[in-house]
Image: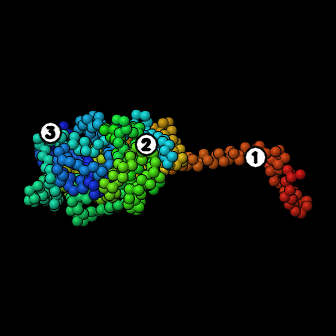
Amino acid sequence: MLPPRPAQTLWLAGAVYKDGRNLCGGDGCPLAQEPRWVIGDPGEHFSSHGFLRRSEEKSSCHWWRSDIRVAQLARGRSINLALSHRGRQALKAIGLEDQIVSQGIPMRARMIHSFSGKKSAIPYGTKSQYILSISRTNLNKDLLTAVEKYPNTKVYFGHRLLTCNPEEGTITVLGSDQVPKDVTYDLIVGCDGAYSTVRGHLMKKPRFDYSQQYIPHGYMELTIPPRNGDFAMEPNYLHIWPRNTFMMIALPNKNKTFTCTLFMPFEEFEKLPTSRDVLDFFHKYFPDAVPLMGEQALTRDFFLLPAQPMISVKCSPFHFKSRCVLMGDAAHAIVPFFGQGMNAGFEDCLVFDELMEKFNNDLSMCLPEFSRFRIPDDHAVSDLSMYNYVEMRAHVNSRWFIFHKNVERFLHAIMPSTFIPLYTMVTFSRIRYHEAMLRWRWQKKVINKGFFIFGTLIAIGSTYFLIRSMAPRPLDYLRRPWDWVTNLQNTGHVSLKTPWSH
């Protein structure tokens, strides 16, 4: 039995780095873990979050990368973070919410850019609801600095995870001296991204399920610089150029720039081998963005890095006995289209903390419950992220979609506890992801049935008033069909002549 923790607990829910060779979409796992008996290992292709508890025990984090606070980071290898309620709740629990939020830019709506350059806003929720555009690099730096304030936590930079033995609680790391070193821990928290080495060892265990899916679309990062020292577009929006099979988005940064990301099928990227092809493509599909980017900067950024892939990962369970647990991308890498990767990873930490409190630090009880509780939610947010890509690149162009959204907002305004829009449930609450999905499907059925009933009533009413508006003679003729029977008896045939044909 592990020694009990102090009653007061500190979590550090934190940040993420996207390696240029992959995009996990979701960003979440521990950066520094439960003292002494938890270890995080953000390895190659690392995309991680962290948590830190205040305790008398020791914790270690082995990080493959060098210290990002002093290292030169390559640009063009990440997608901005969108911080929302779930992530903020985790940050609030550790006292970092105000610090991180102060560095973000509120985005209150989607700003849709049409082919013609016309712009229209689709609010995310009420006037008081917004998401925050957060710098990935700055968030990582702040979290590392917060971790290092605690003397019971040690962060090792430049340590690559080579092997993991969950049964024995041992890992083998390769440091800067290139000498493999075995380390033993009571609990190993695998937070080493979508291509997790820790998960790779768990996959060899019986009854461990795993699946991955590369979507046929890639992403490429571009930039809109400031104009006359200010933002070139409205800053408090997530800008979207939806083009049905592909799209571009732009998120604001504190330095007055916009980070643009082009999401498009790989075969479309392959059709743009030259600068002329790129410019022709952008002038055709994003004509209002070209003068904001600048043709020279656009072509330079476009060929800086090739389009990067996006992967979705699902696995089950998230734990092995009481010695190892997966979090974040290692457990559930997702595509980035719902902006929930970071927030889901933060919530992993928060849920784990809540379960540790519930089970009095008994890992043999906490880890199985973490898997049972969290797997349905993380699989659900993965599916929702796939759906939201279609919504962002295609549905937002539809008037019927906009009408449906307005109906949802109206119903939510008059029945706030009964009808809650999907985006509100996912982004502005802690309703469990799988419950939000089930509720959304039920609400869609109710609304569609309402539309059907309303349409039927309109059709019946219109028919009735049409008949009432007809001339009296034909109306009387239609009301007495038995005249046809009488005519048949008297003449031996039915006259098809109508009264208004005279």
Residue where numbered disc 1 is placed: 467
Amino acid on which the number 1 mark rests in the picture: Ile
Q: Secondary structure at mark 1?
A: helix
Question: Is residue 437 among what the camera can see?
Answer: no
Residue 312 vertical placement versus 33 (above, below): below
Q: Residue furthest right?
A: 491
Residue where numbered disc 3 is placed: 149
- The CA distance from mark 1 to mark 3 is 81 Å
Give the percent coordinates (x, y) of residue 434: 38, 50
Give whichever of discs 1 and 3 has the lower sequence position: 3
Q: What colouring method underlies this structural image?
A: rainbow
Amino acid on which the number 2 mark rests in the picture: Arg
Q: Residue at x 32, y 58 (%)?
A: 306
Image mark for residue 110: 2
Q: Residue at x 54, y 47 (%)?
A: 399
Of residues 329 and 177, the one nearer the viewer is: 177
Q: Circle 1: is it few (<14), some (14-19), or many (20+) Cα within 10 Å?
A: some
Amino acid on which the number 3 mark rests in the picture: Lys
Give whichever of discs 3 and 2 has the lower sequence position: 2
Give the percent coordinates (x, y) of residue 289: 42, 46
